[in-house]
Amino acid sequence: MDVWAIQERRLVGWASQPKVKMMRAYRPFAWLLVFLIVVGCGARRTEIACEADPRCLRYGLSADFSVLDPHIAALPEAGAIFRQIYDTLVYRDSTSHEFLPGLASAWDISSDGLVYTFFLRRDVRFHDSTPFNAAAVARNIERIYDPQQPSSRARDLLGPLSQYEIVDEYTLRLHLTIAYPALLDGLSQPWLGIASPRALDEFGRLRYQFHQVGTGPFVLESYTPGETVSLRRFADYHVNLSIYSPLVGDEIQRVQIALDSRQTGDVLAQLGDSLDILDDISPADAQNIAGNSRVQVLPVQIPGLVSSLLINTARPPLDDMNLRRALLLATDRAAISDQITFNYSPIAWAPLSASTGYSHTGYVARFAYDLAAAKELIAAAGFADSDDDSIVERAGSPLTLRMVVPPGDQLPQIAESLRKSWRSAGIDLRLEPVPGKSRLTELVLSGEYDLLPIDAAGIDPVVLGQIFANASPYAASRAPQPRLSQLLAQAERESDAQLRRERYYELQALLMNETLILPLREPLRLTVTHANVKNLRFDAYGLYPLLHNVAMQLN
């Protein structure tokens, strides 16, 4: 667990001096590996069943959560709920990715990139009528850094934050130890939605998840773990015109979110029986219902690290550059796109997705499928099929690789496709299904694998550090790469936009030229809705629906 020390600088005279809190941190991405189980009961229930209410939206969410608290939760799907309950200090435009006002109407960044000053809205109250102000933001920061709180995604998104400063009731400064241009991106994500300080204090660390209070367009009515989350519209919501449109009167008033709704059968039947929206359907299901007038399929690109295989360079045989390059050339990504993702998900050629705006376009088709070239590289590495069993050997040992295969995201199908195509190059690929998080975590930390599926959602290219930083849980799979570590540090701190882009291009070039990663496909999420669902949009991150303006056309 990360250890964070918080010291209070005791100041005399509130009016004459700003209030300052100091904090320092060590943050090795431990939130990726923390899983809590908290059991509780919901709050008040809605009297009218959602099925009987024509303005109640039934939303099927594919995931379930061990804990549903924005300052603790890690699963990306949890952000879909937090986006409805909370507002963030800033937002990102879903098309341009420009930063937009949120709870902060304006902000200023010092020339050295170490101080961010936020000028807060004065017309906002939380769902429990608590006023929103700088002290409320400060209370959220204190909770995130509370030593009793587990390491979290929320904490990581704040980067090298060292202190906050309340300048006045509606002005807050954040001080960093080093320049960190990704801070605004972190502050725009739902994990850093601002919660009511009254609710945080009243319900405490374990109970707050059942009594969440934000300033967003919907109020939490109840949360029953493993079953449902119920929301109702916040009547006094001050519409944030940066991301929402004014209401016209026919919008939904309530939302019932069914947890763990991964479809096990007919998607159309599931929609017809119990849901209006079902998220994260498979490309095969999307293909089957394409053209059906009763439903609409919404493909949404997910910016971040592309769906890839992390190549373990820390142990043989993939410490050999020729073999790693051979894997790239022996991978028929066009066949995967056509046969498994039905061309919904484009081929990925570089580590960062095109939707980030940072993808290195110089690698498009550079390592396209070329079985003959792959065989030449394998031979150059000293492997040959001396016993005519179709698997090559070196010094009597067959070329056998071990791939970890978590469930979902078409990974079992992709792994089987790779196993067959790589066998044509003389490679024996062994697949290890990993159904549980504990075994996956064990493998990640130990590095006892050759190939591991990875991805990481996020617009800012700082997401590369989640996998390739020395402090990341994946470091055991990587032989020392001093230049990689140097570039990551430089890119993370670079404030000049053009130089920052160049650093991340150089990083991607290093990852591809050293063949530390095998990009497979661009991340995409498919959501299916009834045809009568209108105005469903997703925020810039692609994972989080914006339900404020959703309406259902009545028959």
Image (spheres, rainbow, N blue to C red):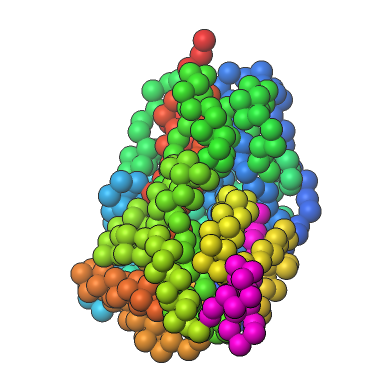
Res 155 seen here: no
User: What is the count of numbered marks?
Assistant: 0
**Residue 448 occupies quadrant:** bottom right
Taking the spot 41% from the left edge, 89% from the top edge, the residue there is: 482
**Above or below, comparing residue 411 to residue 180 in the picture:** above
Q: Main secondary structure of the magenta part?
A: loop
Work out whether residue 84 or residue 520 is closer to the camera in this orientation and state it. Answer: 520
Work out whether residue 3 or residue 358 is closer to the camera in this orientation and state it. Answer: 358
Q: Which residues are magenta?
A: 383-407
Work out whether residue 534 or residue 13 is closer to the camera in this orientation and state it. Answer: 534
Q: Position of residue 498 (x, y in %)?
A: 20, 69
Q: Position of residue 233 (x, y in %)?
A: 53, 33
Q: Position of residue 184 (x, y in %)?
A: 36, 63
Taking the spot 62% from the left edge, 30% from the top edge, the residue there is: 267
Res 394 seen here: yes
Taking the spot 39% from the left edge, 75% from the top edge, the residue there is: 511
* On-image quarter of the N terminus: bottom right
**Above or below, comparing residue 446 to residue 452 in the picture:** below
Residue 288 drawn in magenta: no
**Residue 16 occupies quadrant:** bottom left
Q: Position of residue 105 (x, y in %)?
A: 31, 52
Taking the spot 66% from the left edge, 24% from the top edge, the residue there is: 269
Residue 389 drawn in magenta: yes
**Residue 487 occupies quadrant:** bottom left
